[in-house]
Image: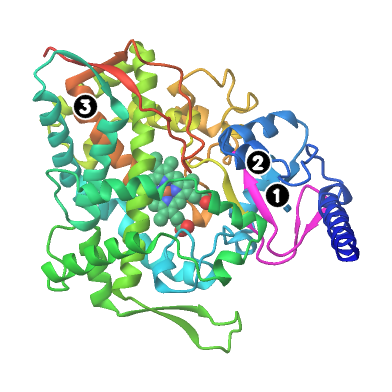
Amino acid sequence: MALIIVFISLVIILAVLLYILLKRQKQYWRKLNIVGPKPHLLFGDYKDVILRHITHFEFHEEVYKAYPKEKVVGLYRFNTPVLLLRDLDIIQHVFIRGFDSFINRGIEFGNNNRNANLAVSTDDTWRMLRTRFSPIFTSGKLKNMVYLMERCGDKMLKELDSQKLSSMDLNVQEIAMRYTSGAISACAFGIDMDKPDEKLLKLEKMLFKNYLALELFYICPNLLKKLGFNAAPKFISNYFQDLVKLVNMQRNGKPSGRKDLMDLILEMKNFSEKIKGGQKNGNKDDEPKVLQITDELIAAQAMIFYAAGYDTTANTLSHMLYELAKHQDIQEKLYEEIKKTLEENNGELSLETLKQMSYMDQVFSETLRMYAIADVQRKVSAKSCRIPGVDINLKRDALMFVSVRGIHYDEEYYPEPYKFDPTRFSQENVKSRHPCAYLPFGLGPRNCIGMRFAKIQSKVFLVKFLNNYKVEPAAATKKLKFDPMKITLSVAEGLPLKVIRRNK
Ligand code: HEM
C-alpha cells in the first residue's frame, strides 16, 4: 500500500514538474515582447498541422494574416520556439544581407556522405557543394538539355494522341508527373524511360511524404543527427547509388557527349577528385576542409536533384493548367504566343525560342505566386545575433519560418490576391514591388539551384501541350484541396480536367 502511495505521489510530482516546465517554455516569446497566438501546452501552436488536419502552408498563412501590424510573430511547435518573419526588410536581412549568420536550414541528419546533399548539408560542406554544383545549372549548360526535355514532351503527346479522342477527362497531375519524371531522369541520369520505372514511381511517393517522424526535429532538434538518421530510407539511397554506379560504368567514368547532368558531374570529377574549401573550425590557420567526390556523394546530389526537381515542377504545371482551364482568355493569349514564336523560329524549340515567350514567363510566375510549392522557408541562426527592425537578440540555432503564401496573398503587395492575373509580372509591375515580395524559389545565396532547370522544363511542357491541346474544367473539377500528408503543395486526389485536341 505504502509503495502504491509513493508511486502515485511520484507520478503527481513528475506531472506537476512537467506542467511547470512546459508552461515556462511557452513564456519564451512573451518575455521577449513578441506577440503570437496562445499555445497549447503540449503541441504549441501547431496542433492541427502536427495531426495532419491542415497543411503548414494554410496554417502559416492564417497566422500571417492574423497579425497584420507585426514584423515578426512568436510561435511554438511543440516546445520549440519558431519566429515567423513577416517584414520584408527583415526577410531580406536573413536571406541575403546577413546570410552568413543564417546559412543553414536546421535540418540535419547523420554525418555521412549519403546525407551530404545540397539541401540539408551545412556550413562549409554546403558552401563547397554549392560552389561545385552551381555551374551545372547555368543557362549555357541547360540549353544543351532542351532536346532531352523535348523528347519527353513528344512522348507525352504520343500517349495523348494514341487515345484517338477529341476530348477526354484526364488527371493532368498524372500527365505532368509522367513528363517531369521522364525529363529529370533523362537530364539527370541519362535514362530514357519508355515506361516509367515502377520502383522509381514508388520511391517518389515516399520522398515527399510528410512523415510524423519529422516532428522529432521540433521535439528534440538534434536527435536525428545524434542518432545518425539518414535523409532517406536506405533502400532509396541504395537505388540512387546503384543508378550512379551503372551510369558511371556505362560511360567508363567519362562524359558521354549527352551533355546531361551526369556528364557534367563526371567532367567535374575528372577535373578533380576532391572539393576543397572553408576552414575546419572557421580558423584561418586550419587546413582547408576536403570533400572526396565519391559515388556516394554524387548519388546524394542525384537523389536531391531528382526529388526536388520532379514533384515541384509537376505540381506547378498542374496548378497552371487548372488556372488556364478557368481563364480561357489567358490560355488563348498564351497559345497565340506559342504559335507565333514557333512560326517565327521555323518550329525549332531552343532556349532562345523559349526566352522569346515573355507572356509564358508571366503565367509561370503568377502560378507560383498563387501556388508556391515549397512554402514555409526555414532558417536557423548560426550564432547569437540581433535582428534589425525588431528589438530582440536571437540565440544560436533559433528557428525562423517565412510564410511564402502569406506574403504572396498580401493585398499590400498584390491587390486582389485571389485573382489569377499574369500581368502582375510585367517588367514595370515587378520593379515597383519590394524585391523580397516574391519568393517561390527562395532568396539569396541559398535559393533554389534548379530554378532555371524548372522554368525550362515547364516551358517545354507548355509549348508541347498547349500547342496541341487545350484544357477546360471537367465535371469532376473541384476547388483545389491540398494534402497535409505531403511536404510540398500538392492536391490530394489528382486534378481532373477536360483535355481537348486543337483543330489545326
Ligand atoms: C517549380 C519548381 C521548383 C520550386 C518552386 C523550387 C523551390 C525551391 C525552394 C523554395 C528552395 C529553398 C530555397 C531557400 O531556402 O531559400 C529550393 C531549394 C532547392 N531546390 Fe528547388 N524548386 C523547384 C525545382 C527544382 C529543380 C528542378 C531542382 C533540381 C533539378 C531543384 C533543386 C533544389 C535544390 C538542390 C535545393 C537546395 C539548394 C541549397 O540548399 O543550396 N529545385 N527549391
Say if 144 sits above or below 46 in the image.
Answer: below
Q: Is residue 332 visible?
A: no
> Going 32% across and 21% down the picture, which residue do you hit?
496
**Which class describes the residues within 10 Å of circle 1: few (<14), some (14-19), or many (20+)?**
many
Marked residue nearer the N-terminal end (2 or 1): 1
Asked whether residue 401 is drawn in magenta, I would say yes
Q: Nearer the viewer, mark 2 or mark 1?
A: 1
> Going 14% across and 13% down the picture, which residue do you hit?
166
| Secondary structure under the numbered disc 2 in the rendered image | helix
| Secondary structure under the numbered disc 1 in the rendered image | loop
Q: Nearer the viewer, mark 2 or mark 3?
A: 3
Q: Nearer the viewer, residue 207 or 75?
A: 207
Q: Nearer the viewer, residue 461 or 322?
A: 322
Q: Amino acid at mark 2?
A: Leu
Q: Position of residue 140 (x, y in %)?
A: 26, 53
The image quarter in which residue 57 lies: top right
The image quarter in which residue 395 lies: bottom right
Q: Amino acid at mark 1?
A: Phe
